[in-house]
Image: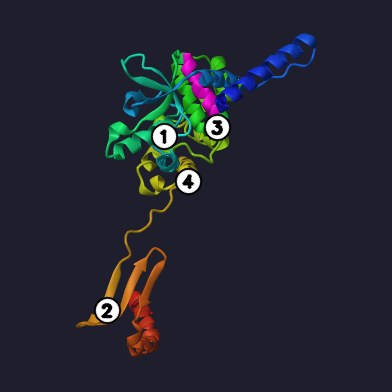
Amino acid sequence: MKKSILQRMAEEAVNRSESVETNAIENPTPARRHSSPVIANVGKSLTHLGEDSILSLDPSKIDRSPYQDRFNDDQDAEAELEALKTSIASEGQKIPVLVRPHPAKPDHYQLAYGHRRLAAIKSLMADAERPEAVKIKAHIRSLTDRQLIEEQAVENGVRENLTWIEQAMWAVQLKEAGLSHRAICPVLALSEAAVSHLFRVTSVIPTDIIFAIGRAKSVGRPKWTALAELLKEDRKIAAVRKLLETTEFQSKDGAGRIGMAIDRANGIIATEPSAAPEAVNFTLGERLFGRMKNSSSGTTITIPKKEDAFARWLAERMPELVREYDHQSDPVK
């Protein structure tokens, strides 16, 4: 029987590890090399997955991990989820998720990783004519809370697509779960200084503002740090909160939202677009001679082509009308 890809990858990782250990025994003095603990855990996880059997489970019996490392209500995330949903509907689920028996609900499970796959399959289940026929492929493994966190770290370390603020908010949850700064470092594959900076930002920017801005794919540490510096004053937090419910703010992507938040904290208020343009028709009976329309950029008068004679007459009278208006606005002249 052919070995699975995961088994081959796991064995390769183990063989590489054994080779390094052998070289270390034969050559005990070479310079030490430091690698990411997240990457170091990949081989172990692949070994476990190679040993685990794949089962088909009822998606409705799987709850998300208690440690949320990604934002839910974000336009980019929703678009990605729709794309994954379409892919699974047409090609099937290619990669199983990892779950553990739920610690509080019998016959239920808790997700270790694969939350986007689970969300997509649950959405397909909701749309299906026979929901009970929809299943999700999963590995089941007994995991402690710490092991659950490490498995999430492995997936995120391999994909490397958590945004900076998602990392920061995940760090907050890990700290609330009892992990020290030093223990969080290998989970996020970051230095202590980098982890401390995450907490400096999240300790200042209120959670509601962070989630309103969203995962902000293209926004990194500098802009979040700049916003945190500005929001050290309560009045600026209040000003930004007033911005969150506006249509203009909500229509922007993450980069646009944080830009608007920074502007508002700096006291810059964009001019609200005017209401729907006002239009006035010039008519005589059912005959339309022209239309005057107001907009934010000015006022325009449109005369139908069939009323060219009126247009020429108006053009000839325009100097006189301008003089009349000017005299009326300043009767002293």
Please name the amino acid that badge 1 sits on: Phe
**Residue designated by label 4:** 256
Q: Nearer the viewer, mark 2 or mark 1?
A: 1
Q: Which mark is residue 159?
A: 3
Quadrant housing residue 9: top right
- Nearest the eye: 273 or 5: 5
Distance between mark 1 and mark 3 Cα atoms: 22 Å
Examine the residues drawn in magenta and state their main secondary structure. helix
Q: Contact, CB < 8 Å: mark 1 with mark 4? A: no
Taking the spot 51% from the left edge, 18% from the top edge, the residue there is 51
Quadrant for the N terminus in the image: top right
**Residue designated by label 2:** 282
> Which element carries disc 1, helix, strand or loop?
helix
| Left or right: 93, with 48 as reference point | left
| Left or right: 252, with 218 as reference point | left
> Which element carries disc 4, helix, strand or loop?
helix
Taking the spot 41% from the left edge, 30% from the top edge, the residue there is 207
Distance between mark 1 and mark 4 Cα atoms: 14 Å
Taking the spot 40% from the left edge, 48% from the top edge, the residue there is 251
Q: Earlier in the sequence, mark 4 or mark 2?
A: 4
**Residue designated by label 1:** 211
- Nearest the eye: 56 or 45: 56
Q: Earlier in the sequence, mark 2 or mark 3?
A: 3
* Label 3 environment density (alpha carbons within 10 Å; few <14, some 14–19, many ≥20): few
Q: Which residues are magenta?
A: 146-157
Q: Earlier in the sequence, mark 1 or mark 4?
A: 1
